[in-house]
Image: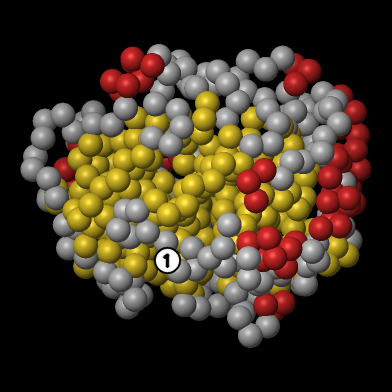
Amino acid sequence: MNNVTQLLRYSSSIIFLTTLISCGGGSNSSSNEDSTTLIEEKTTTCPAPSPFVPNSPNHHYALFTFSEACSEDIEKVKVYSKGDFCVLRTQQFVASHSAQKVECTINTKANDLINIMTNTSTPGLLDIAIDVNHTDPTQSILYILEAQPHEKMTLTPYILHQYKVNGTHIASKALTYNIPEDFRKVYSVDQDSYEIASETQNPDAIGSIGYHNAQLIPNNGQLYLLSSAFGSSLFRINAELKVDLSIQLRPAINGLNPYSYQSYLAFDEHQNITTVSDVSHEMKTVLDRLFNLPIKGHSERSDIRHLTLFTQLSSNGELMNRYYAFPSTNAKGLRGIAYKEGLYAIVMNSLDLKASQQLNYLNYDLQIHYLDAEANLINSVNLDVSQTDVITSVIQTPNGNISIAGYNGFKRALTNSDLSDPQGFISVFDFEGELILQSIYSDRRASRIRSLDWFNENVALLGASIDGPITHTEPSGQYQRAAIVLYSH
């Protein structure tokens, strides 16, 4: 089957949906009518978007475009059958009003595009995940993680919602666990001290304070939550939505933004777990007081500014190993981890300081480090795709290759202002470090791919922001659309 035929196979049954949603349409909804009314009232003072017909560059086809709000964005796309998916998108209106929607398609029919949940509170919906039922995909389970503020609680507790992808609500539950006191210690960088972050209203609540970063990962019939709760922690959740395992990967440290220090995980063929976490010099100062961890793969260096903390757990959650790797002076943060046949691939953004000073803009590159099971460095790849390269999504293809999405082809000033319009990109690597696919997606003004998932090895679903502003865009241009894009190669 050639690429064009394959693209049509996945798009023909839903091509007419663009007339439903593009230029201000939305998904059908049997609930949340009050939210819809509020949206209509708020949009009257938004900058008026210019007429817009999506392009289809380089084998990309825009299935849906959204322009209900002043600014639309796609946070996550997840596929669950040959042509169906769910999406988490964000809407920003005037007067600091925002909303989030979770929507799914059913049997790739327009009248089955349903609104599962609408949220108008902050911080709101953090992530979605799907536990796919391969026998009957319409019975797949959709999980939605919400951070729901509580006026009498210091932390913002997590609520886990469970739905079928057809919109049937199954359960919603606040996540709790008998949290060890060590989890509640918040450490100081400057001195060997800590304070206990107590939660008197609900001492067993799981949540985070100030910053909310969380990922839901279904695996082998179980659900895992990797989040910024208590520093950086991993929780396992059973079918009754009860937490039956908790591991603190990294303690909480005063004054450090969890958004800047991410964690990711991968499973091997035995269901053992490897997590990787960003560690700055300040974090290492605290961790050195708590643990005596080796640095693998490199000798000690005095100019280390960035490390990666590896934590390896057995399939039942027992700690097997913990160590540092990848001392670096130019890493700008982890973006993902992948595993295949005994090898790990660690994906990072890096910053070439020397090139940045010469070019007078921030020169971010892509880095992939390949390790064996003993953390020996096998290979490293550094790729400067186009000017500033920013990674937003890392996911393995059905064959296990490493797909990376984000945006590039623009200039970001040394002051961190964007000076030109970015374009979306997809790069796919194998586990030998070979680049096997490179594609660009650009559709009027600023285009950024936010999320990526794969129907099969040749057809992907992209969540993107398009027709957006950059740092110093005039007020009349301060609007942004969102798009769900089918890509075939």
Which amino acid, mark 1?
Gly
Q: Is residue 50 left or right of residue 350?
A: right
Q: Residue at horizontal 41%, vertical 23%?
A: 362
Tell me, what colour scheme is on the image?
secondary structure
- Of residues 139 and 381, the one nearer the viewer is 381
Q: Nearer the viewer, residue 256 or 380?
A: 380
- Looking at the rendered image, the quarter that the N terminus falls into is bottom right
Q: Position of residue 155 (x, y in %)?
A: 52, 46
Task: Compare residues 94 and 400 and report the one nearer the observer.
Answer: 400
Badge 1: residue crowd in 10 Å (few <14, some 14–19, many ≥20): some
157 on left or right of 20: left
In-image side of 235 versus 450 (left or right): left
Q: Residue at x 75, y 21 (%)?
A: 477
Q: Nearer the viewer, residue 254 or 40?
A: 40
Q: Residue at x 68, y 60 (%)?
A: 4
Please report the residue visible at 85 percent of the width from the left and 62 percent of the height from the top: 110
Give the farthest residue toward the front.
2
Q: Find numbered disc 1 in the image and state the secondary structure of the residue it sits on.
A: loop
Is residue 127 visible to us here? no
Q: Determine which quarter of the picture holds residue 97.
A: top right
* Quadrant containing the C terminus in the rendered view: bottom right
Furthest-bottom residue in this view: 135
62 w.r.t. 113: above or below: above
Circle 1 is placed at which residue position? Answer: 400
Rendering coords of residue 407 (x, y %): 53, 37
